[in-house]
Image (spheres, rainbow, N blue to C red):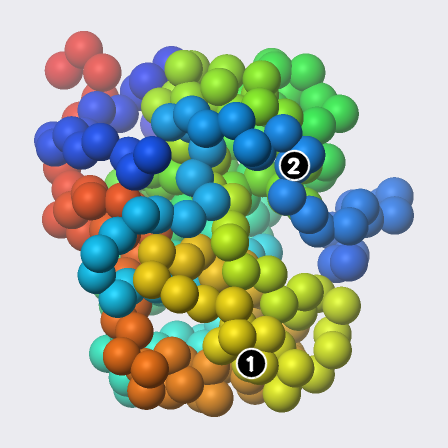
Amino acid sequence: MFEMSKRTFLSGSIAALCGLHPLEAEAAPVIALPNDVAQRDAATIMAVRTPSPVVSMTFDDGPHPRLTPVLLDMLKARGLRATFYLIGNRVVTWPDIVRRIADEGHEIGNHSWTHPNLAKFSDGRVLDEIDRTSNAIFKITGRPPVTFRPPYGAFSRRQRLMLYEARNLPTILWSVDPQDWRRPGAGVVASRILKGSRPGAIILSHDIQSGTVKAMPQTLDGLSGRGLRFATVSQMMGWPLWQSRRFRRAGT
């Protein structure tokens, strides 16, 4: 069985980084940016400085057995790529959808195994949540995720630096938050994304929310109509397309 160890994977190419849902028994915290993101470091990405009119649509908490395929159909019809931050225990439940996400050119990121509030966890428990998810994604797609997004945004700067050192995974946050998890309605979700997006934006959304998926035609077409193009998170950071990167086990 494949197991991930410290810096298990090395990429074949190197690029510099530009400087309530029912998954927990306890009440879910509010989704918000950490209060320490003002300090810049390579381990934390909220947006990307780019002269190109590019944005990154990101979808958290899937895969969803019904909604994610509908969203994938929308993206495919428009020839657009997005980044999906998947939960490990959902990855192993719906592997065919995970495989489809990868096969259709989208990027898959790590969103932990059980979607806990990681800010309350020890480093060992944090790494276990992340490693189990990376292993599951690797087993299904043949490649590991190269970025991580913390559930609820709850991840301290110390934890972000720890993860970057231990696993070479930058923490991807966001610059546009339509608060779709509050279920304000598809029109509101689309309006908030269109209003907040500009080149280099990383847009937070959730493909487990029906209102979000219903908002996507207006959102995607509206952004395209403004001349904005779409890229995956790591592409926007200057890395090659996730599917084209070559990974090898450390020490091989």
Tell me which residue sits at (59%, 61%) in the image.
Answer: 177
Which x, y percent locates residue 5? 38, 16
Residue at mark 1? 190
Locate the N terminus by quadrant.
Answer: top left
Tell me which residue sits at (55%, 81%) in the image.
Answer: 190
The three-letter amino acid code for the residue at tag 1 is Ala
Which x, y percent locates residue 44? 46, 33
* 130 displayed left or right of 36: left
* 188 displayed left or right of 163: right
Q: How many marks?
A: 2
From what the image shows, is residue 2 above or below residue 82?
above
Which x, y percent locates residue 184? 74, 78
Secondary structure found at label 1: helix
Dot 1 crowding, Cα within 10 Å, few <14, some 14–19, many 20+: many
| Residue 224 shows up from this direction | yes
Which label number is shown at residue 34?
2
> On the image, which quarter does residue 51 sit in?
bottom left
From what the image shows, is residue 135 above or below residue 83?
above
Sequence-wise, the earlier of marks 1 and 2 is: 2
